[in-house]
Image: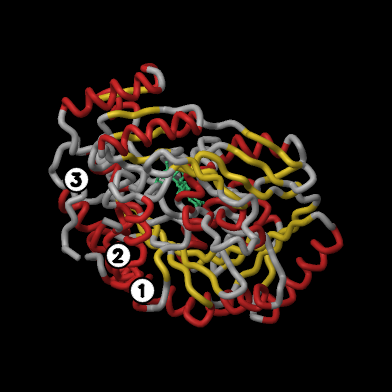
């Protein structure tokens, strides 16, 4: 691992002007000229994702997303035709969903072709008996949820980025939403996928994931960040909208008490849909800004929902008893309700961070045996990696819980980074490196739900080890022998 990563790497596209002309002509003939944009127009219309690296490089006139050609297909057959052409010509291809990723994964950082999937946004079928639905990848999560809500149904995938993230991008980045503790991360919502392979082959994976017809291949593509295939349809599981939501809020004297209460809740089989435990800094400087309730110690918000009022009431009561038994002091239930009503304000001005700030979330996941130490080690490493003159802020919460463990969500910010690009990126990278290595040394996994992208690619070898990377690279080579899909991403090539 080098100390300073040159994300822009100083090269222009791998394609010559002649290649770009040939590619554009072939795509125009196979699809339609009006589905293609090239050159500067492509860079202007597709500035890249929401990763801080993408934003800071673009700000300094060095865009990390620099496709030569962007194509916007409207059908699986068109995606297949595009991949056949790209594969025959050996052109790098990067799929693009809602461009809300925060790791730089969707950037066409070595030029080539970007496939914008937002034109594929139809619902293909809705099965009201099985409560399943097949949708195209470009459908925006919020639009999908609103469409379902009108029918009394829910996708239950509620990421904070719902208004930008696409269903396909959520699957490809292995995302998670605020209701994950009960309903699961995106991988738990996915029943099946339709995927276009690098050579243009169209694969319909088995309709449901519970089978013994060989290994479960669908999950191989979940989290593959566009490196193995283009997801062109997703069959997902739905739920009815809950008839009741109940909130409880507790203040703890220490984070450890809150973690133990959360652990007891999860291992005893209770399933709150939301369980968010904020450390002191996150309570005071983040949650308090949304709820204005005078919070002054580690706080946990719990939401229980469901289709049966009596079960919701009993679960809420039992969760409360467990929190109280671990030192939790109950606060007004309106705190949780207010957080729920205001949960998106953090992602819009004036709360959302903007340049010249530096910011990043270093989420990591582990079992209960290691989670508290993971929290202490990662937050300490982040603090110690930065000179105090930069006024680092660090707010951490635990928001996705499992019956074996949980995750930490440390968000750091520097109010004003260095003016010079290289120094700013070096400062950002120093913090990311310290946090990543501390998480790995503590037995944590990088990361919980934001994916790898450009930011964490250098740590894939630390995460998987040499043999693990050989396995992953072997899978990649087998599916994509010409390495056309997202070359260099996920540390696979
Ligand atoms: C303010 C904010 C809040 C956020 N909150 C959350 C949150 O609560 N939970 C969460 O999980 N994430 C969150 N994110 C991160 C981001 O929204 C997720 O990573 C999301 O899953 C990305 O979806 P997208 O459609 O924008 O994908 P993109 O950013 O366009 O792409 C992500 C990756 O998927 C690949 N890809 C996209 N579509 C396809 C496809 N059809 N087939 C194959 N590969 C594809 C891309 O090549 C890239 O590697 C947040 C981001 C922001 C900016």
Left-right relation of 432 to 5: right
> Which mark, residue 224?
none
Q: Distance between the residues labelled 2 and 1?
A: 9 Å
Q: Position of residue 118 (x, y in %)?
A: 48, 32
Instruction: Choose the circle earlier in sequence order: 2 or 1.
Output: 1
Residue placed farthest to the right in the image?
310
| Residue at position x 45%, y 34% in the image | 117
Residue 350 in sight from this viewpoint: no
Q: Contact (CB < 8 A) between labels 2 and 1?
A: yes
Q: How far apart are marks 1 and 3 (CA)?
A: 27 Å
Q: Position of residue 351 (x, y in %)?
A: 45, 45
| Residue carrying label 3 | 8
| Residue carrying label 2 | 459
Categorize mark 1 by other alpha carbons within 10 Å: few (<14), some (14-19), many (20+).
Answer: some
Q: How far apart are marks 3 and 2 (CA)?
A: 18 Å
| Residue at position x 27%, y 44% in the image | 356
The N terminus - image quarter? bottom left
Q: Where is residue 277 in the image (x, y as percent from the top left)?
A: 56, 66
Secondary structure under badge 1? helix
| Residue carrying label 1 | 440
Residue placed farthest to the left in the image?
10
Q: Where is residue 66 in the image (x, y as percent from the top left)?
A: 25, 35
Residue 281 in sight from this viewpoint: yes
In front: 223, or 449? 223
Eyeballing the image, is 241 above or below 246?
Answer: above
Colour pattern: secondary structure
Instruction: Choose the circle earlier in sequence order: 3 or 2.
Output: 3
């Amino acid at each position: 691992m080098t100390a300073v990563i040159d994300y822009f790497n100083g090269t222009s596209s791998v394609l010559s002007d002649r290649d770009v002309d040939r590619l554009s002509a072939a795509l125009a003939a196979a699809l339609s000229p009006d589905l293609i944009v090239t050159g500067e127009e492509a860079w202007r219309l597709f500035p890249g994702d929401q990763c801080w690296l993408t934003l800071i490089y673009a700000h300094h006139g060095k865009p990390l997303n620099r496709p030569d050609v962007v194509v916007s297909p409207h059908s699986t057959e068109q995606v297949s035709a595009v991949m056949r052409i790209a594969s025959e010509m050996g052109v790098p291809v990067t799929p693009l969903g809602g461009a809300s990723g925060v790791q730089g994964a969707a950037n066409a950082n070595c030029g080539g072709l970007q496939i914008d999937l937002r034109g594929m946004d139809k619902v293909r079928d809705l099965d009201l008996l099985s409560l399943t639905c097949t949708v195209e990848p470009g459908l925006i999560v919020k639009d999908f949820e609103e469409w379902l809500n009108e029918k009394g149904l829910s996708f239950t995938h509620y990421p904070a980025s719902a208004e930008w993230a696409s269903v396909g991008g959520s699957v490809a980045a292995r995302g998670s939403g605020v209701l994950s503790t009960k309903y699961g991360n995106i991988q738990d919502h996915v029943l099946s996928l339709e995927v276009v392979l690098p050579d243009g082959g169209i694969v319909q994976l088995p309709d449901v994931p519970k089978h013994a017809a060989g290994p479960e291949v669908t999950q191989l593509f979940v989290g593959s960040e566009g490196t193995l295939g283009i997801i062109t349809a997703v069959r997902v599981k739905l739920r009815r909208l809950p008839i009741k939501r109940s909130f409880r809020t507790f203040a703890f004297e220490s984070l450890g008490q809150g973690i133990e209460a959360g652990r007891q809740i999860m291992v005893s089989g209770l399933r709150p849909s939301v369980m968010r435990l904020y450390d002191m800094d996150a309570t005071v400087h983040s949650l308090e800004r949304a709820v204005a309730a005078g919070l002054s110690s580690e706080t946990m918000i719990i939401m229980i929902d469901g289709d049966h009022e009596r079960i919701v009431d009993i679960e809420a009561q039992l969760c409360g008893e467990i929190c109280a038994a671990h030192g939790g002091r109950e606060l007004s239930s309106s705190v949780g309700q207010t957080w729920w009503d205001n949960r998106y304000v953090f992602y819009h001005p004036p709360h959302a961070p903007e340049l010249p700030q530096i910011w990043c979330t270093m989420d990591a996941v582990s079992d209960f045996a290691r989670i508290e130490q993971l929290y202490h080690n990662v937050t300490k490493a982040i603090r110690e990696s930065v000179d105090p003159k930069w006024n680092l802020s660090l707010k951490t919460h635990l928001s996705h819980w499992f019956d074996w463990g949980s995750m930490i969500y440390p968000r750091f910010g520097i109010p004003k980074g260095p003016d010079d690009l290289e120094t700013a990126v070096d400062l950002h990278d120093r913090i990311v490196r310290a946090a990543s290595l501390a998480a790995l040394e503590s037995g944590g996994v990088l990361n919980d739900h934001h994916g790898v992208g450009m930011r964490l690619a250098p740590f894939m070898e630390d995460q998987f080890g040499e043999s693990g990377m050989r396995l992953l690279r072997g899978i990649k080579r087998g599916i994509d022998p010409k390495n056309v899909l997202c070359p260099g991403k996920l540390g696979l090539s």
